Amino acid sequence: MGHDPSLQLYSFPFHAMGTECHLHFYAADQPTADQVMQAAVAEVCRIEARYSRYLPGSFLVEINRIADSGGHLAVDAETAGLLDFAWACYANSDMLFDISSGILRRVWDFKSGKLPERDAVNSLLPRVGLNKVTWENPVLRFSIPGMELDFGGLGKEYAADSAAAVCAALGVRHGLVDLGGRSE
């Protein structure tokens, strides 16, 4: 089923999540397209502000502050959904997809193209593994101090799905949310 031929294709570049992003969708006119674009970009930015490990006021930073002390916290429904999905990915990947492995970036310089020293990696491994974290919705418990979570492996996907839902709610039936862009 094709798009309505009375609709025009609109494309909007924007920057989020450390990369160049684009929205492409069909709309009746420029004011409608602008409204959709603003709402979709706002949703992507909301998710980035909430779950980025790089933004000091994010909820993920708060989670990791508690994780660092080996504490626990109750999370809201949105975060619970992300945690449920992360645990499903962990289980379905035979524990290879692990949102607690982001701590390894402390010793891994991806720009250099060199592997970190084995001892440096081994020093962090005791703090990696979702099997060391207890998730009983809505409570997240860290049994080992110094752990951290990183939604980098699913944050852009979640933001793209959420932005697509915003577009659909505003009447868009055909389009693309591209958050893959070029990393900086």
Image (spheres, grey):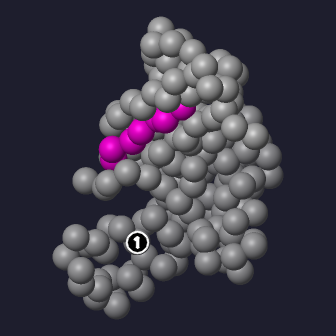
Q: Is residue 32 left or right of residue 172?
A: left
Residue 15 visible in rendering? yes
Residue 36 visible in rendering? no
Q: Nearer the viewer, residue 161 or 73?
A: 161
Q: Is residue 126 left or right of residue 166?
A: left
Residue at which label 1 appears: 104
Q: Answer with the quarter of the image where residue 76 lies.
A: top right
Q: Is residue 24 magenta?
A: yes
Per the rendered image, the range of residues in magenta is: 19-25
Q: Is residue 95 left or right of residue 41?
A: right
Q: Residues within 10 Å of mark 1 (few under 14, many from 20)?
A: some
Residue at image coords 68%, 51% = 83
Q: Answer with the quarter of the image where residue 58 lies.
A: top left
Q: Main secondary structure of the magenta part?
A: strand
Q: Is residue 129 magenta?
A: no
Locate residue 111, reporting x and y percent.
22, 70
Residue at image coords 46%, 27% = 10
Residue at image coords 65%, 68% = 130
Locate residue 134, reporting x and y percent.
72, 60
Locate residue 49, reporting x and y percent.
45, 33
Residue most extreme to the right: 136
Q: Secondary structure at mark 1?
A: helix
Residue at image coords 55%, 41% = 176
Residue most extreme to the front: 5
Vertical placement of 7 versus 133: above or below? Answer: above
Q: Is residue 148 left or right of residue 4?
A: left
Vertical placement of 99 versus 46: above or below? Answer: below
Q: Answer with the quarter of the image where residue 79 lies.
A: top right
Vertical placement of 94 versus 31: above or below? Answer: below
Amino acid residing under circle 1: Leu
Q: Nearer the viewer, residue 31 or 100?
A: 31
